[in-house]
């Protein structure tokens, strides 16, 4: 098939590579404009643009895909179908109806659950047991079109947003390559979404990573995993941003708990008043923080301006005492960190 491919981040690279390897003719790649990144503010190409250039495929980077000039540009490239994967802009009805087989989207959730911009991370944050990929026909609504096929992926107990992203990226590449010839031959029966079962996955922001220690340890631990690797969960240590990259939920008694929970000895459980955000136990390889429900055992951190490190290395250079309270709202510096 002749294909116009639309995508921007890493998630969209593997499907593009798979489509090319399968022998389809990608006549154009559409991606977001280059952006300044890093402290040097150097212009950086999107991962999808880099992939397209490696394969000698023309690249189009519209600021606004719905503008008349952009629509006219798209119309100049032959295509049987448009394939979209995390492109980052909504398409107009004029664009959606342009190719013979319309536009299909590689969506990183089991629709109708988690429509929206960040389905991977929200599935982890909300403690879902599985996620997956849906190949769907695009329409005017946000991820509301009919579904061609799905493939589920279990979410492991210590799954992060990054690790689930990589799993779903690979599944998306497999599923789109399997689906395209079946769509062309009319072999896939479209399934309408049940709108009563939907939930939304809003766009991630850096601000949502600020840990609220009044919440329970289970919710905080899921937030840490879900926002790994971006935008990351963080708190404040002596006025500086402290990212928390790895933590366990601690059971305050020696008995009970789940397989994923760490244990804290009973003799340690009462050593400090459990004010949410306060340090209640410090050991060589970790420290425990009181929350609104249970304790959180912190194992890997990154202080503002420093590299990520195990807690045992952090404790060699920074003082962490029982009774110290980590602030939920304090200071600035997140933008540069």
Image (cartoon, helix red, strand yellow):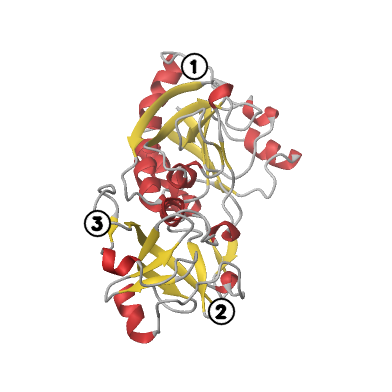
Q: Residue at x 47, y 43 (%)?
A: 126
Q: Residue at x 62, y 33 (%)?
A: 142
Residue density around tag 3, few if under 14, some if 14–19, many if 20 or more, within 10 Å: few
Quadrant (top left, top right, bottom left, bottom right) of the N terminus = top left
> Would you place residue 297 above or below residue 9 in this image?
below
Residue density around tag 1, few if under 14, some if 14–19, many if 20 or more, within 10 Å: few
Location of residue 315 (image quadrant)? bottom left
Q: Nearer the viewer, residue 109 or 36?
A: 109
- Is there a contact, CB below 8 Å, between mark 2 and mark 1? no
* Sequence order check, earlier mark of 2 and 1: 1
> Would you place residue 210 above or below residue 47 in this image?
below
Location of residue 145 (image quadrant)? top right
Q: Position of residue 168 (x, y in %)?
A: 38, 41
Q: Nearer the viewer, residue 297 or 86?
A: 297
Regarding mark 3 in the picture, which secondary structure is present there? Answer: loop
Asked if one can make out residue 22 in the rendered structure from this viewpoint, the answer is no
Location of residue 37 (image quadrant)? bottom right
- Give the numbered dot on residue 254: 3
Regarding mark 2 in the picture, which secondary structure is present there? Answer: loop
According to the picture, the residue beneath numbered tag 1 turns out to be 191
Nearer the camera: disc 3 or disc 1: 3
Q: Is residue 103 left or right of residue 187?
A: right
According to the picture, the residue beneath numbered tag 2 turns out to be 239
Q: Is residue 77 left or right of residue 106?
A: right
- As drawn, the residue found furthest toward the right would be 68
Q: CA distance from mark 3 to mark 2?
A: 35 Å
Q: Is residue 67 left or right of residue 165?
A: right
- Is there a contact, CB below 8 Å, between mark 3 and mark 1? no
């Amino acid at each position: 098939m002749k294909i116009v491919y639309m995508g921007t981040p890493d998630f969209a690279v593997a499907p593009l590579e798979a489509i090319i390897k399968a022998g389809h003719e990608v006549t154009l790649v559409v991606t977001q404009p280059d952006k300044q990144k890093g402290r040097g503010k150097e212009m950086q190409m999107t991962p999808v643009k880099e992939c397209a250039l490696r394969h000698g495929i023309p690249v189009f980077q519209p600021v606004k895909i719905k503008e008349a000039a952009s629509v006219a540009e798209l119309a100049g490239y032959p295509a049987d179908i448009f394939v979209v994967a995390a492109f980052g802009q909504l398409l107009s009805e004029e664009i959606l109806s342009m190719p013979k087989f319309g536009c299909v989207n590689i969506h990183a959730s089991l629709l109708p659950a988690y429509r929206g911009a960040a389905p991977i991370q929200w599935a982890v944050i909300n403690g879902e047991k599985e996620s997956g990929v849906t190949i769907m026909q695009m329409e005017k609504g946000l991820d509301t079109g009919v579904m061609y096929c799905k493939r589920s992926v279990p979410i492991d107990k210590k799954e992060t947003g990054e690790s689930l992203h990589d799993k779903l990226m690979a599944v998306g590449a497999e599923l789109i390559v399997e689906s395209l010839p079946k769509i062309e031959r009319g072999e896939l029966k479209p399934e309408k979404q049940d709108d009563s079962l939907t939930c939304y996955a809003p766009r991630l922001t850096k601000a949502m990573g600020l840990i609220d220690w009044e919440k329970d340890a289970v919710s905080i631990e899921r937030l840490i995993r879900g926002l790994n690797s971006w935008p990351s969960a963080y708190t404040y240590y002596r006025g500086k941003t402290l990212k928390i990259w790895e933590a366990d939920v601690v059971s305050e008694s020696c008995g009970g708990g789940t397989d994923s929970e760490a244990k804290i000895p009973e003799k340690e459980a009462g050593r400090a008043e459990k004010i949410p955000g306060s340090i209640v136990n410090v050991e060589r390889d970790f420290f425990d923080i009181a929350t609104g429900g249970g304790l959180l055992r912190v194992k890997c951190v990154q202080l503002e301006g420093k590299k990520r490190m195990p807690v045992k290395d952090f404790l060699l250079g920074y003082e962490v005492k029982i009774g110290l309270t980590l602030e939920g709202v304090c200071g600035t510096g997140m933008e540069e960190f």
